[in-house]
Amino acid sequence: MTTFFLARHGETIWHAEHRYAGNSDVALTRHGLGQAAALGAWAVDAHLDAIVASPLSRARRSAAPAIETTGLELRLDDRLVEIDFGEAEGLTPDEIVDRFPAEWAAFCEAPASKPLPGGEAGRAGIARALPVLDELVAEFPDGRVLIVAHATLIRLMFCELAGMDPDGYRDLLPVLGNCNLTTIVYPWATESRAAHHPRIRLLGFDVPPSRAD
């Protein structure tokens, strides 16, 4: 069974201002760098076999302390980038409502199916990202893997893996803390599961590194 530790990157300058940061490359704040350091301290005794990250700088920088403390090589995968929010990139929710009221309402109703203007559907993000986990399961069938990625993508993947409707991710999982860990285990092969049957076992959700096993 492969154990995955899914971590959101540290706080960025846009997130501190409540701005949507999808596939835009946004720097970490000083607080975000501290959160990344805490993740690195957790990694010391986590017995990791691999560390994989989104290539966006906020994810790479958040994974860097864990690389330093474990000596593992950082593996980057383009499929782990955040959902593209299109014309809403860099905007606050209030600004999105002002500019795109109808599109924002549609997005809030079905955020995995109805993207913001010029953006990527959440279900498309699920389709590109889940094969990364499947490939890592094949490579590390009894391993422990840290994945440093993004809040929306992690929540979407979690819903899909847990047999939940991804369009409910904003209501079901409203918050995912920076550099917090969601721990899941793949106990069964994908092809053996029934429709809507969980592919995973959940060991922890949104747990600060200082409290994670």
Image (cartoon, rainbow, N blue to C red):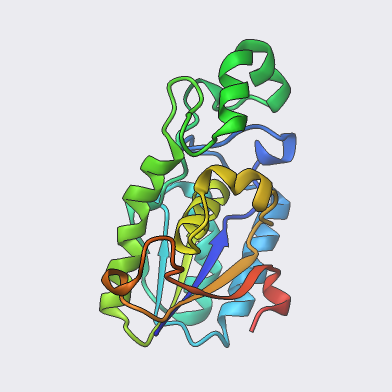
- Asked if 128 appears above or below 187 in the picture, the reply is above
Res. 79 visible in picture: no
Taking the spot 45% from the left edge, 40% from the top edge, the residue there is 122
> In screen coordinates, is 57 left or right of 20?
left
Q: In which quarter of the image is the C terminus?
A: bottom right
Taking the spot 52% from the left edge, 56% from the top edge, the residue there is 164
Question: Is 26 or 19 nearer to us in this picture?
Answer: 19
Res. 48 visible in picture: yes
Q: Which residue lies furthest to the top in this view?
A: 99
> In screen coordinates, is 12 left or right of 152?
right
Taking the spot 62% from the left edge, 63% from the top edge, the residue there is 36
> In screen coordinates, is 152 left or right of 1?
right
Residue 183, given in percent of the width and then of the height, sits at 56, 73
Question: Is 30 or 82 nearer to us in this picture?
Answer: 82
Taking the spot 36% from the left edge, 72% from the top edge, the residue there is 73
Q: Residue furthest front?
A: 194
Q: Quadrant of the N terminus?
A: bottom left
The quadrant where residue 170 appears: top right
Q: What is the count of numbered marks?
A: 0
Residue 110, given in percent of the width and then of the height, sits at 54, 34
Question: Is 198 or 195 nearer to us in this picture?
Answer: 195
Question: Is 186 or 61 nearer to us in this picture?
Answer: 186
Residue 9, given in percent of the width and then of the height, sits at 57, 55
Residue 126, given in percent of the width and then of the height, sits at 40, 49
